[in-house]
Image: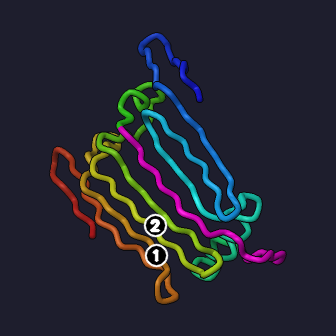
Amino acid sequence: VIDSLHFWGDNFNYTPGEIVLESAVTDSMRYVSLESSILNARIDGTYRFSTLPDEFSNFMHQYLPGFFPQNRYTRQNYNNFNVGVEIFNTKVLSQILDLPLTVIEPIKMKANVNIIDNRLTLDGDIPYVKFGDMDVRNNTFALSNSDGSLSLKTVVNLHQQEGAIALN
């Protein structure tokens, strides 16, 4: 637990509040969670960070071989886990760090990575963020590998003073 983090400078004074990092291991499952005023994240299931990069690269090689090389050294697939992430309002943090993206309404993402059964799902809901001068509202995405192919379904809405663009 970090309870007294403080950022300050010439034009800002920011205390993000308590940050809690927690993990546990049981016979059948592991989890790691991070909770703060800006971000909540959790990973749970059976996973090994030491094998994940090679397993994920081998998994993605079947869909994007130009980006993900096939690893010659292959271990028995082990990773089967869920990830949940929620990012809250980052207005103050974006100003302090001069970030181009500001989260206005909470972003929610969840994923299931099951290398053992060759399954991947990633879903996201992005209700309202600002990217520079653009308002990006009511966006969703769903990535999955059902039926042996990788598919992405997305809705993107960009709003500017001159008008809006919707991509589906």
Number of numbered tags placed on the structure image: 2
Q: How are the residues colored?
A: rainbow
Using the image, determine if residue 20 lies above or below residue 24: above
Q: Circle 2: is it few (<14), some (14-19), or many (20+) Cα within 10 Å?
A: some
* Label disc, if present, on residue 144 of the rendered structure: 1
Q: Name the residue under label 2.
A: 122
Which quadrant holds residue 118?
bottom right
Farthest residue in the bottom direction? 147
Q: In the rendered structure, which segment of residues is drawn in magenta?
A: 70-88
x, y percentage for residue 5? 55, 21
- Of the image marks 2 and 1, the number of the one nearer the N terminus: 2
**Residue at image coords 28%, 45%:** 134
Residues at marks 2 and 1 touching, judged by CB atoms closer than 8 Å = yes
Using the image, determine if residue 90 lies above or below residue 134: above
Magenta region includes residue 77: yes
Give the amino acid type for the residue marked by disc 2 in the picture.
Leu
**Residue at image coords 36%, 49%:** 107
* Label disc, if present, on residue 77 of the rendered structure: none
x, y percentage for residue 55? 70, 71
Asked whether, in this view, residue 152 is left or right of residue 130, the answer is right
